[in-house]
Image (cartoon, rainbow, N blue to C red):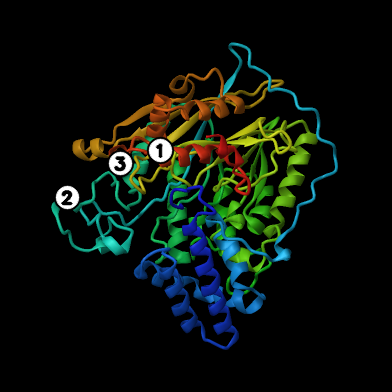
Amino acid sequence: MVGKQTWEAQSPKNLLFCSTCNLGVAEIISEVNGGVDPEALGDLIIALCVDLGISNYNFCEHIIHLATPELYWIITHRELTGKDVCGMIFMRYGCKTDNPERVWEVVLPDTPKPPVLPPSVPEPGSPVMKVLHLADTHFDPLYMPGSNAECGEKFFCCRESSGPLDRPEAAAGKWGDYRNCDAPKWLLQAMYDHIASTYTDLDFIIWTGDLVPHNVWNTSKQENLEVIRETVQMLRESFPGVPVFPALGNHESTPVNSFPQPYIENEFDISWLYDEMATLWETWLPQETATTVVYNACYSTLVKPGLRVISVNSNYGYGFNWWMVYDDKDPGSELQWMAEQLQLAEDNDEKVYLISHIAPGDVDCIRYESTIAGLFYAHTHYDHYMVFYDHEQPDRPVHVGYVAQSQTPYPELNPGYKVYTVDGAYEGSSYRVLDHENWIIDLDEANKNDFPNVTLLYSAKEAYGLSDLSPTSWSNLVFEMNQPNSTLFEDFYRHYTKAGRPYAERGCDDKCKSDTLCRLLVSDNSDISHCDLL
């Protein structure tokens, strides 16, 4: 998970950040070229991490210690500049590379785009499907009730190792905590039990990644795999017979965010993770998907005749995946593969659900506008959506991507889940999302009463007065919420933060409102012009 995104790419603060980064990284590269050893390199990167304000020394020291061998190898095997490195890793802060080698394209199939027809409106009584969306589980097997939830510079708390309590109020709640703590197993199990008893008619589950807890400076392959295995087993036992379509999260790797290209076959080879995911996902996926899962953690498979899921490993394009600094040109060939899979689906008159952990900064949904029926993401931990617009007709909304709320409370959120009602399986179905319901566990109430009461927070159409959940409706809602003193925005922000008490206590000022609404309008971070309308 990344902190809340703002849209200040060219702010003076960010310009200072980028210039400091450029100079600092240039010095580090010069030291490496001069023969500095990996341990000394680690010290230099830790200092830059602190100087840039990325985190405190404790955090920077431990996470850089894990990452130094990979960073040293990358710097010594690719000709780099400070501006190139910062422009790749910190693009979200407005840093830019001027390296022409970083400009590349994916060639789409030359089949002409078919005419765009509006999705069919389901007849009353038409079949529907119920689809559960789980995301950002972040199961912490070491969560300990009563431990220190205010562990300061350790950043990740609610464990025996979090140190002594400074005050009674610092004790971690039994059912989870608003502070920097992840989900205990019994919290997740209570949520799964509620889903299984409430939605006995689930057709399938979308599970968009991040299973491993946030102790990012102290992870190992063995520990990550143990958490992944146990979390998968929980889902198997809770929803027997229900198909699950997973995507890979950025926390599944160690070091966190590290996803080397498939052709990296040295000590940094990531097959330890992909091979395990292929084995675990065999519970739900056909055997033929294993070929692509072990290569780049992507797959394409039919949900049922006429509906296909394409799962994309978005971690290859994540800004904090430093392997992009080494080679960012369609790592794993997944974008080329995705285009081919979309074309095959279009040729076979199939609709497609695209799923991935991290929502895109830029994705070509326009070419396959009529083929893609749903876009489903995770990563932010908030409950929201994002509107995609036509590049050639910027005022025309063409798709909406749904970003699911997290099961973990981290940070300051109630755990929750989302269930979609979608156009069902019949001849001519659009397979579009028709509505969604969103449930939470109020942590204050659960810890006070020692019972995790799962309650319906809202359903989309009713909460926002929408006649349908089309891209146009969601786009219009943003501008309705932008009106001064909009009660619609107050409702949306409460849902966005899953009614977390800390957010309610802080409120959302004008800048918070503008940033929140802007994020709903931007699917291509190189063009935030829609935010100018707010």
Tell me if 489 is positioned left or right of 305 in this view: left
Disc 2, SS: helix
Sequence-first disc among 3 and 2: 2
The reply to whether callout 3 and callout 1 are in contact (CB within 8 Å) is no
Q: How many marks?
A: 3
Sequence-first disc among 2 and 1: 2
Which residue lies at the image location 47% right of the left edge and 43% below the top edge?
Answer: 135
Residue type, label 2: Glu
Local crowd size for mark 1, using a 10 Å CA cut-off: few (<14), some (14–19), many (≥20): few
Residue 495, how many percent across, how many down? 40, 32
Q: From mark 2 to mark 1, how far is it between C-alphas? A: 32 Å
Residue type, label 1: Asp
Q: Of tags 2 and 1, which is closer to the observer?
A: 1
Q: Which residue is mark 2?
A: 169
**In the depicted structure, whether residue 81 falls above or below residue 161:** below
Residue extending farthest bottom: 35
Which residue lies at the image location 24% right of the left edge and 38% below the top edge?
Answer: 444
**In the depicted structure, whether residue 405 falls above or below residue 75:** above
Disc 1, SS: helix
Local crowd size for mark 3, using a 10 Å CA cut-off: few (<14), some (14–19), many (≥20): few
The reply to whether callout 3 and callout 2 are in contact (CB within 8 Å) is no
Residue 386, how many percent across, how many down? 55, 37
Which residue lies at the image location 72% right of the left edge and 56% below the top edge?
Answer: 333
Q: Which residue is mark 3?
A: 506
Disc 3, SS: helix
The answer to whether residue 240 shows anywhere in this view is no
Which residue lies at the image location 30% right of the left edge and 41% below the top edge?
Answer: 506
The one nearer the camera, 100 or 278, is 100
Residue type, label 3: Arg
Q: Which residue is mark 1?
A: 510
